[in-house]
Amino acid sequence: MPRLASQVAITDNGSMMIEPTNQLSRFNAESLSNEALQMRQSEPLLAGLIDPLLKALPDSGKFYAALVTERLNSSQLDRDHLHSAALSCFSNPLQSAAANADLSAIVQRDSACQSALHALLFSKGFCALQGYRVAHKLWQDGQLNAALLIQHTISCQLGVDIHPAAVIGCGVMLDHATGVVIGETARVEDNVSIMQGVTLGGTGKESGDRHPKVGRDVLLGPGAKILGNINIGTGAMVAAAAVVLKDVQPHSVVAGVPAKWVGRSDSDNPAELMEHYFQVAQEERNKTISDSAAN
């Protein structure tokens, strides 16, 4: 399976500069247009969503801007100003490339995804992530209240709550996405898969840098809670419903409440493999048996 390659650098103001290299792009304007026209003809109910997107083709930046505008359309947001903010974001080739990488991640990893168009139209995780990218740019530009309004709208309409100050790389998939929460000082590097119900949160009322830092190629299982300014190492896997309060070493598997080490990942890249089953290491089995005998 092709990897999504990119170089990521954290700038002084905490933003993430994405410089894709050999970027695998799933944005094929001609293919999307043909599929969208066929879908519109066979299922007219979708015309209201598809028509504005068709008008934006073949430019990927304009397409993503139109998508965010349509999906976040709300009486609370001025449509023209939202579209302008989205265009300003995705006219940057790096931001458009990041969206392409996010799209590729869904097509590659989500077994329910039928095509790139299917992901664009129906993946609320993808839409929420692109809405975050617009809000993040507004936050960087000093338009804090506008950024927070977009965050609020994404949360209300899509059930995903990402603070606009959070730093998120490219090739990220929010699978199902319902209930995902990513806090203000969280950082998520490239090629990460985040399942529904995941929280990257703080541990209380502390201020400052207080949220998790997630490395490349990490898989965060359904309902996992990662709390505090801790590091999830490259290629690690956090099992479903785990509550993580301490650093996780690269390529480790952690599970339980509170989470503890149970073995090593069978893959260097759990995010792409998307395999949630794991085997408990023999040494951990022995420890569990010993602890049970002692009690």
Image: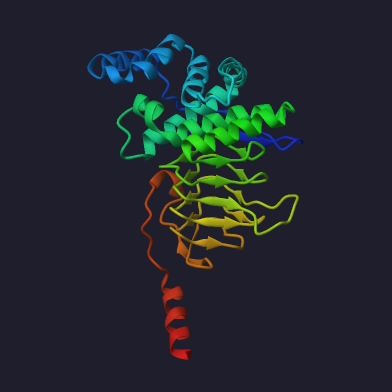
Please provide percent x and percent y for residue 21. 55, 28
Above or below, 15 against 218 in this view is: above
Position of 115 with respect to 189 (left or right) is: left
Residue 6, percent across and down? 56, 33
Residue 32 coordinates in the image, percent (x, y): 36, 17
Towards the viewer: 186 or 9: 186
* Residue located farthest toward the bottom when viewing the structure as drawn: 294
Position of 149 with respect to 177 (left or right) is: right
Q: On the rendered structure, is 126 left or right of 95?
A: left
Q: Residue at x 30, y 31 (%)?
A: 114
Residue located 49% across and 61% down the image: 242
Q: Is residue 76 visible?
A: yes
The quadrant of the rendering that contains the N terminus is top left
Q: Foreground residue, 151 or 141?
A: 151
Question: Is 276 or 117 nearer to us in this picture?
Answer: 117
Q: Residue furthest left?
A: 42
Q: Residue at x 40, y 68 (%)?
A: 280
The image position of residue 98, as x and y in percent, is: 54, 28
Residue 148 in the image: above or below residue 250: above
